[in-house]
Image: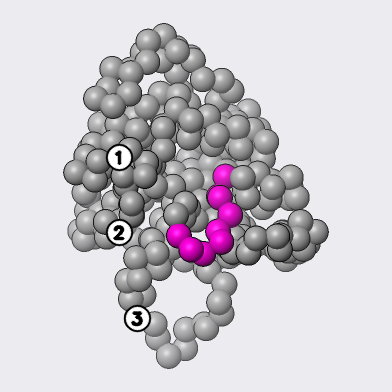
Amino acid sequence: MRFAISILQRVPDGTFDPARLRDYLTRAEGLGFHSAWTQEAVLGSAPTLAPLELMTFAAACTERLRLGCAVFVSPLHNPVHLAKSISTLDQLSRGRTEVGFATGGRGRMFSAFEADQALLVARFTEGLRLMKACWTESRITFAGRFWQLDGASVEPNPSRSLTRRSGSVAITRQRCAVRSATATASLVLAALPQRSSPSRSTFFARRWQNQNRTPPPSRSPNASTSPLTTTQPAPMNASTPGSNRSTDLLA
């Protein structure tokens, strides 16, 4: 069993204490936590720090703790910019980055990001293909519906030489189960090592359920009531509801 912890993101204006967050992260690493996680929330009244910048700060404070975001709402991003930012973070953290991607919910103000809600899935799948190209191809020629590149390059790629431990990927769609992270990584990040497991898929699924206020799975009377997130293995197969809805995203 591996344990994960959230990185504190709710910070009212003028109250950020770098020393306190540094102590929090180093303490979590010292206690043996496997990873620390953020989530993305651009708009809203809650004072929420952006995930990539916060993960970069966390990378500078730690040496072993893996750092993740569950999830990036990728249709709201330019995939080239997002790919560049993630690969930079993976270099700075020396291969400790974990990322998840999703289409986002209906309640989001997509007009603020020049995204047509009716085309979210198309933007989502094309954006993933383009990010994969940015991470795996030395010269990118891409003729997509939303983005086009001709002989471009994006360097550096995510870290691959550092003990073969670069980040894994999970893909979700609104209100559906997360696919096996191992299978997904082989589609999205062919250049990155695949040190994923169904336990990480379970973690993404739980965070996704919490984001959408879906009731959590029933728990036995003896289940732990610890507020810490645990990543426990769960089978993911073709019979799992929604598990095959993104099977052909990057085929």
Above or below for 167 versus 133: below
- Give the alpha-carbon distance from disc 2 to disc 1, as whole Å: 13 Å
Query: Callout 3 environment at 10 Å: few (<14), some (14 to 19), or many (20+)?
Result: few
Q: Amino acid at mark 1?
A: Ala
Q: Which residues are magenta?
A: 44-52
Mark count: 3
Queried whether the magenta region covers residue 50, the answer comes back as: yes
The picture quadrant where one finds residue 220 is: bottom left
Mark in front: 2 vs 3: 2
| Earlier-in-chain disc, 2 versus 3 | 2
Q: Amino acid at mark 3?
A: Ser
Q: Which residue is mark 1?
A: 115
Query: Is residue 196 something one can see in this rendering?
Result: no
- Residue at screen point 39% across, 47% down: 73
- Give the alpha-carbon distance from disc 3 to disc 1, as whole Å: 37 Å
Q: Residue 242: x, y in percent?
A: 22, 56
The picture quadrant where one finds residue 147 is: top left
- Residue at screen point 39% across, 64% down: 211
Q: Are marks 2 and 1 in contact (CB under 8 Å)?
A: no
| Earlier-in-chain disc, 2 versus 1 | 2
Q: Residue 244: x, y in percent?
A: 22, 49
Residue 107 tag number: 2
| Quarter that holds the N terminus | bottom right
Q: Which residue is mark 3?
A: 218
Task: Indicate left or right for 147 with 168 as reference.
Answer: left
Q: Main secondary structure of the magenta part?
A: loop
